[in-house]
Image (cartoon, rainbow, N blue to C red):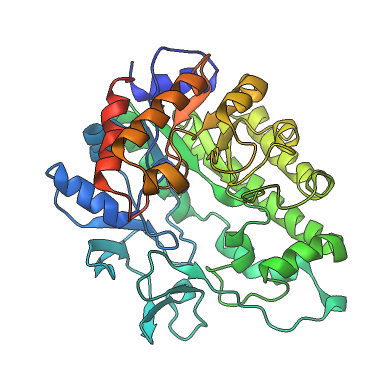
Amino acid sequence: MDGRQKLKETLEHRDCGKVTFDLGGTKATGISASLLYRLRKQYGRDEPVKIYDTYQMVGLVDDKDAEMFGIDVLPLWSDMTVFGYRNDKWKTWTTPDGTPALIGEGCVMSEKGGRLYIHPKGDLNARPSGCMPQGGFYFDYLTRQDAFDEERLSGYEDYLEQLEVMTIDDTTLKFYEDQADYYYSHTGCGLVLNAEYGNLGSQTMLNGGYAKLTPGIRDFSEFLVAHSLYPKYIEEIFEAWTKLCIRNLKLLRQAVGDKAQAVFLCGTDFGTQHSEIMSKKMFQKLYMPYFKRINGWVHENTSWKTVYHSCGSLVNILEDMIDCGIDCLNPIQLSADHMDPQSLKAQYGRRLTFWGGGVDSQTTMAHGTPEDVEREMRKNIDILRKDGGFVFSVVHNLQNNFAMENVQRVFDVLREYR
């Protein structure tokens, strides 16, 4: 049974006796570019690693990696990045930690005081939208909020440049189509369509790293306050974003069709370490109507299962997320309050696919031993794989500072479940 069949079976909540393994299939199940380079080198593949997401500094996992590491799922990416340049052509770059890499040809950086800055759309004259501090692992978004007149807030006008950048053009559509055709015909891997056009309320949407101008409310805390003070403003933004998302999905259905088994739609974090980031009532009022429309369109017009990412504790809104039509939840942050895999599987396992929860990154992968990693993996696999509905991935991305022995133990244990 190949990875594609395993993914289909588990998404239909059928236990095929094997575990589906995702590494690199989405932006929340990826691997640090530097770690990927070192891991490949250990397996005899010594070449620069492509960095498709400079925000998280995540490496591009390809079909060679899938065969080498036993990965069952491969990604279908947009060529457009969160900083507004395309990944259709590549140039050499050495990361600050010395890793040989390739980065999108249009990426433009500047340096000041030991900090690296990325400028939107490759325009050095534009105010930078991302910054990597000295010794850092990632590019943090820079909040670019100027004074605004609350009487003149316009959700559509304030986000117009971003909506234009995120509108799929023929170049991007062909980019998706070519990946789908190649991976579908040359591999047996399942395919995940990464189409985060439904990222309502996410940092990516809010900070607009791919836009030169970011008018309106952009500070994260002020944006959350605006949910109460200016709900019509939030609804106007979400309405425009929802229309864009469905418009793009219609095109992607034509380009990719049934070659993809799942679509990754949203990476908005609704949880913190201890609770949800907003009330259940606010989630129901401001998010559910739009998520229902997006997921409803997918279910009515495609065979794809929808994947949503949200870190943190989510137990008070999980029923609402299911009611929105969400099929798969990632990353299942085990270290957050009330996110016990046994309880989650018992209560939601027949209605949600748990795309993650294999082993915790915040604690075990970062600070444990290989034996700790294996122990937690076996426990969680035994719980979550029952009756299907489980795609193994580490809780969020494999980080640059994870011990190689811990990463290798993940691969070693998973071989037994293939």
Question: Number of numbered discs present?
Answer: 0
Task: Give residue 253's position: percent from left, percent from top.
Answer: 54, 37
Quick check: can you spot residue 286?
Answer: yes
Quarter of the C terminus within the rendering? top left
Q: In this view, does 199 lie to the left or right of 110?
A: right
The residue that appears at 57% across and 60% down in the rendered structure is: 204
Q: Closest to the observer: 396 or 403?
A: 403
Residue 123 sits above or below residue 245 on the image: below
Task: Give residue 319's position: percent from left, percent from top.
Answer: 74, 32
Task: Give residue 279's position: percent from left, percent from top.
Answer: 80, 49
Residue 271 sits above or below residue 298 on the image: below
Q: Closest to the observer: 312 or 178?
A: 312
Quarter of the N terminus within the rendering? top left
The residue that appears at 38% across and 69% down in the rendered structure is: 136
Q: Is residue 151 left or right of residue 399?
A: right
Dividing the picture into quadrants, the one containing residue 91 is bottom left
Return the residue found at the far left. Answer: 44
The residue that appears at 51% across and 23% down in the rendered structure is: 384
Dividing the picture into quadrants, the one containing residue 48 is bottom left
Q: Is residue 110 left or right of residue 241?
A: left
Task: Give residue 190's position: percent from left, percent from top.
Answer: 40, 29
Q: Closest to the observer: 301 or 263?
A: 263
The residue that appears at 80% across and 65% down in the rendered structure is: 226
Quick check: can you spot residue 186?
Answer: no
Residue 287 sits above or below residue 263 on the image: below
